[in-house]
Every structure is written in structure tokens, then in C-alpha cells.
Amino acid sequence: MDEEKFEEKVIELQEDDKIILKFEQKKEEAEDLLKDKKKMEHFLERLENKLSKIPMAGQYLSDIPVLILLVKSYMNKTYTEIPIGSIIAIIGALIYVLSTLDIIPDIIPGLGFLDDAAVIAIAYKYVHGDVMEYKAWRDANKLM
């Protein structure tokens, strides 16, 4: 599937009730994960490992490394200028990406990451401004 068709399908899936419901459920898991720094660190390591194996990042999945850094900065208390609801939405979306119980299984070539991208896009609608502020903060402080 070419990138244009991939993006069209992601946009379509953002309106899928099953995917929206899964995202909301993952936000509840995110609240629990946020309370345990060791579990969060392990989760982020597993997510980074999975991300390194995704063949086509596209516009939606390409921001996952920034989201991971944002969560790490928040957990380390180096960046806390973000509403807790935004952190929960980001972590919830990242939990979905790492989950093996996807709406579309990741092992399906060309399609398996569509739902992951849609969930990231849904979360991004809520947190875009906060992520842009984090990026500006990170750039101003010359952090990677």
C-alpha cells in the first residue's frame, strides 16, 4: 500500500467506533501505568523496540519517538508543563500501539499498522498544541 492510500485509510479509521473505544480504554490503562515509574520505563523500552521494527512510519507514526521523549521528560520531572489529560491521552495511544490485541493485527503486511496510526492521530487531535510546546521547549533547551 502506498503512503497516500495508507493516510487515506488512517483518516477513515479515525472515525471507527471500535478504534475510538479502544483508545478510550487504553487511556484508563495509562492512568494506572503513570503511577508506576518502573513499569512505565519498561513499557517505553518495549515500545521503542517495536518502533524500530515498523517498516513504514508515515506521518502519523513518525512522531512516536517525540511522544516517548515527552513521556520520559514528564516522568523524570524535567518537563511538567503539560496537562495530565494530555499525558494520559499520549500514554493511552502508545499502549495501543504496543498492544498485541489490535483491531487490525500488526502482522498483516501493509495494513497492520493502520489502526495504530489512527489511534495516534486521534490522540494527536487532543494533544497537538502540547506536543508542539514540548518540541519548542526541547529545542530551546537543546535536548534530543
Image: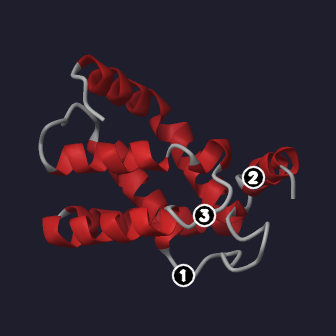
Q: Which of the two discs, 3 and 1, labels the residue nearer the N terminus?
A: 3
Percent coordinates x, y for residue 115 in the rendering: 67, 64
Discs 2, 3 touching: Cβ within 8 Å = no
Amino acid tagged 2: Val
Could you give the CA–CA distance between mark 1 and mark 2, rounded to whole angstroms? 19 Å
Q: Going by the image, does 117 lie left or right of 79?
A: right
Q: Nearer the viewer, residue 14 or 139?
A: 139
Whether residue 25 is visible to the viewer of this picture, yes or no, is no
**Would you call the spot at circle 1 few (<14 residues within 10 Å), some (14-19), or many (20 or more)?**
few
Q: In which quadrant will I find the N terminus?
A: bottom right
Q: Going by the image, does 70 lie left or right of 73?
A: right
User: Which numbered dot is residue 80?
Assistant: none
Discs 3, 1 touching: Cβ within 8 Å = no
Q: In which quadrant will I find the C terminus?
A: top left
Q: Going by the image, does 132 lie left or right of 34?
A: right
Percent coordinates x, y for residue 25 in the rendering: 47, 69
User: Which numbered dot is residue 10?
Assistant: 2
The residue at 60%/63% (across/down) is 54
In this figure, which residue is indicated by the disc labeled 1? Answer: 100
The residue at 62%/46% (across/down) is 60
The quadrant where residue 82 appears: top left
Amino acid tagged 1: Thr
Q: What element carries label 3?
A: loop
Q: Which of 125 and 46 is in front in this view?
A: 46
In this figure, which residue is indicated by the disc labeled 3? Answer: 54
**Would you call the spot at circle 3 few (<14 residues within 10 Å), some (14-19), or many (20 or more)?**
few
Q: Nearer the viewer, residue 11 or 49?
A: 49
Could you give the CA–CA distance between mark 2 and mark 3, rounded to whole angstroms? 16 Å
Amino acid tagged 3: Ile
Depth check, mark 2 against mark 3: the one in front is 3
Percent coordinates x, y for residue 47 in the rendering: 41, 66
Could you give the CA–CA distance between mark 3 and mark 1, rounded to whole angstroms? 14 Å
